[in-house]
Image (spheres, rainbow, N blue to C red):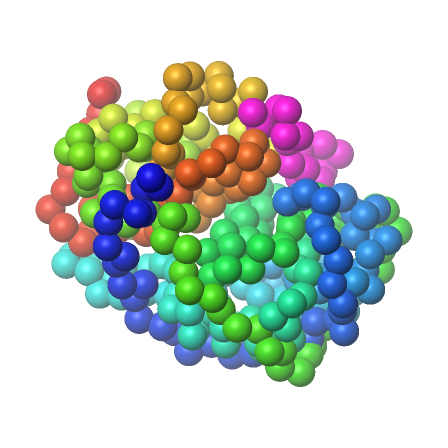
């Protein structure tokens, strides 16, 4: 039984009206070999895939250039927010309708093979945004998607065309599927784990200084980690070299999971401060290491501490 099969789905929040971004290539469809594809493969199949530049903001591509002809979408365009008890809860997955609007504005069709291209020279706010976008595509039922290893930087190094600005496009016919509840963990799911009613392992993907409570983010009300959580920093799953951020191999990802989470054979719930960087760890564990039953706690400690009177722990 999966994590979410035992619980009712929570509301996804208030949808944010999102502008259409730009233009995707007139692409066909091809089977992807892995969840991460190299620049050489992407170049060889560029007429069969829909490439999308995805990062926190357009300026992240100042040093690398955009993949030529591909549209751009920023993180704020595909997330939503809702009121909480203490403050607004941000960084949440949008409604299916809102996400559908984003994808159609990017020129994506329902049967497109999507390759996500971060800038490729930074982990936080770039590789992490690409993984979050990937997770949302999978969450809304689009399986034919991969992340470009090394992003636009690797594309450029392999001889691909880059541009100073992203492309533009007419609307596509992308349709969001029913949310896959097994990929998303809610506060109710996390509470059930802490109360001993669910066998899932909580995994904290933040830097160790945040796990131990030595520092915290201002949008999290408290320091420390969830009770019973084990640390697995998100940066373990990437391997920057020569100024380009590459992903770990499947073998390396499996070794990381085995060494950091020994004895963890059942369900896993990844979390961070907001559900942003934990998406990178989710991608590393679920997609690269190919572990089953891995969920992402959407909202993470931001929601846990600001939408209820819940505490964190230090040293447990």
Where residue 297 sits: x, y (%)? 34, 46
Camera-side residue of 3 and 132: 3
Q: Is residue 247 left or right of residue 272?
A: right
| For residue 268, above or below residue 178 | above
Does residue 107 appear to the left or right of 101 in the view shown? Answer: right
Q: Quadrant of residue 233?
A: top left
Quadrant in which residue 315 is drawn = top left
Q: Which residues are the magenta region?
A: 239-254
Which quarter shows the N terminus?
top left
Residue at image location 71% in from the left, 50% down from the top? 32
User: Visible in this render: residue 9?
Assistant: yes
Q: Position of residue 69 (x, y in %)?
A: 77, 69
Query: Magenta segment: does it hold 240?
Result: yes
Residue 85's spot in the image, x, y percent?
A: 14, 58
Quadrant, the C terminus: top left
Q: For the view shown, which residue lies furthest in the left direction?
A: 309
Q: Position of residue 157 (x, y in %)?
A: 83, 46
**Residue at the image position 31 percent from the left and 71 percent from the top:** 14
Q: Is residue 223 magenta?
A: no
Q: Relative to 251, say whether 8 is above or below.
A: below
């Amino acid at each position: 039984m999966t994590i979410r099969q035992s619980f009712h789905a929570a509301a996804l929040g208030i949808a944010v009206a999102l502008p259409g971004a730009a233009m995707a290539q007139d692409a066909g469809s091809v089977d992807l070999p892995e969840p991460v594809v190299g620049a050489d493969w992407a170049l060889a199949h560029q007429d069969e895939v829909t490439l999308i530049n995805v990062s926190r903001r357009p300026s992240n591509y100042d040093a690398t250039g955009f993949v030529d002809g591909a549209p751009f979408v920023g993180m704020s365009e595909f997330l939503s927010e809702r009121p909480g008890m203490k403050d607004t809860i941000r960084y949440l997955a949008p409604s299916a309708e809102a996400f559908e609007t984003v994808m159609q504005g990017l020129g994506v069709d329902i049967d497109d093979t999507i390759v996500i291209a971060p800038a490729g020279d930074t982990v936080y706010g770039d590789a992490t945004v690409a993984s979050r976008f990937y997770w949302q595509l999978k969450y809304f039922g689009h399986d034919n998607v991969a992340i470009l290893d090394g992003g636009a930087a690797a594309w450029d190094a392999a001889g691909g065309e880059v541009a100073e600005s992203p492309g533009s496009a007419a609307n596509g016919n992308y349709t969001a599927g029913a949310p896959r509840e097994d990929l998303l963990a809610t506060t109710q799911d996390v509470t059930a784990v802490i109360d001993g009613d669910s066998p899932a392992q909580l995994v904290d993907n933040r830097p160790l200084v945040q796990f131990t409570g030595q520092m915290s983010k201002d949008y999290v009300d408290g320091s420390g980690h969830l009770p019973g959580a084990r640390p697995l920093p998100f940066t373990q799953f990437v391997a920057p070299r020569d100024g380009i951020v590459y992903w770990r191999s499947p073998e390396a990802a499996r070794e990381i999971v085995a060494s950091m989470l020994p004895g963890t054979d059942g369900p896993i719930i990844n979390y961070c401060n907001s559900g942003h960087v934990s998406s990178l760890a989710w991608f590393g564990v679920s997609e690269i290491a190919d572990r089953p039953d891995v969920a992402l706690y959407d909202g993470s400690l931001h929601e846990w501490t600001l939408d209820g009177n819940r505490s964190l722990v230090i040293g447990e």
